[in-house]
Image (spheres, grey):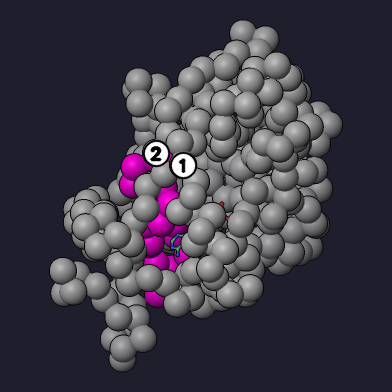
Amino acid sequence: MGSMVQDHHSSLQPQWLQTGTLWSKIRLQTQHALDCGALQPIPTTYDWVEQNGIRFVVRILANLQRKVAAKESQPKNFNPFLPYDPNLFVTDLSPTHLVLLNKFNVMDHHLLIVTREFESQDDCLTTQDFQSLALGLSEVDGLAFYNGGPKAGASQPHKHIQIVPLPFVPDGSRLPIESLLLENTVSAQAGTNPRLPFLHLITRFEKLDFTQPKTLSMYLLEAYRHLMISLNLMSIDSTKCSQGAYNLLMTREWMCIVPRSQEGFGDIQINALGFAGALLVRNPEQLAYLQAVGPLTVLQNVGCPA
Ligand code: AMP
């Protein structure tokens, strides 16, 4: 198994991903990481919770002990992505980014696209980020997401974009509230849905051309900047810092930005997946609380006023 693992600190230059190879690398490395115990999936059950006729999938964690224990045994400023665990390394994507398996995955094949050098999760996304993201999405039909800052659900300060393959729910549902997100938007124009009680902005793409990664990454960066500037998360003359926490969600068909006011409501934590209609609770008590207050109310409270 050792031969599968590449060493980035050797003299070899990081390679671009060879087209059509990502899935086989993911499968091989997942098996290896499970066999050696590096990958520690967190088992869940799931249920549906509805509010205003809108259905959310809620995953209920069976056991968080290993993740909690791992966190408690880590030194204070531990960075799990630099250096990363070679047993979780999937592949180089580009000279600036690589792919890791999410160590504590709730969904199968949950990928992290991390920067090779340290960059802050509070920094805005760059052309290189979108180039890597587009490469990842061209190989894996998934939901890409970014938790921009701790208030948006980020637990690690080293820049990491995430991809979970679709469909999202074990019953085959692609993404629980995708059709609702897209209800009011037409191609290439930013739109919102007034049925969603939190500030958000969505762009639906014309068909993306994954064969032209450079042009595509410029297009995606422009779409992102347009949404961020429209939501006052970035100033017009800035290519750098964002001015607040936000979640980015993106598929091959659309991109959505949701500004954030807080990390959680009650003791339910929300990251980008919440705005795709997928929530996570730690125990049956939290599920009961969520059923009582309603998922839309939770999202309204962790988002910003629409
Ligand atoms: P977030 O919590 O959204 O910032 O995403 C960071 C992810 O990194 C979490 O989902 C963790 O499960 C995952 N993680 C934590 N430690 C490691 C590690 N050593 N290697 C890979 N993934 C990790």
| Residue 78, above or below 178 | below
**Amino acid type, callout 1:** Asn
Marks counted in the figure total 2
Q: Is residue 108 magenta?
A: yes
- Residue identifier under label 1: 63
Please identify the residue farthest to the top as the structure is shown. 53
Q: Which mark is residue 134?
A: none
- Mark earlier in primary sequence (1, 2): 2
Q: Residue at x 57, y 17 (%)?
A: 49
Judge by depth and name the residue closer to the eye, 283 or 56: 283
Disc 1 on helix, strand or loop?
loop
- Is the C-beta of the residue carrying label 1 under 8 Å from the nearest atom of ligand 1? no
Disc 2 on helix, strand or loop?
loop
Q: Residue at x 64, y 48 (%)?
A: 153
Judge by depth and name the residue closer to the eye, 212 or 301: 301
Image position of 15 (left or right of 205): left
- Residue identifier under label 2: 43
**Amino acid type, callout 2:** Pro
Q: How far apart in space, not on screen, are marks 1 and 2 (Cα)?
A: 7 Å
Q: Are marks 1 and 2 in contact (CB under 8 Å)?
A: yes
Check the picture and name the quadrant holding the N terminus: bottom left
Q: Is residue 56 magenta?
A: no
Residue 12, horizontal then vertical, whole percent: 29, 86
Magenta residues (range): 94-114
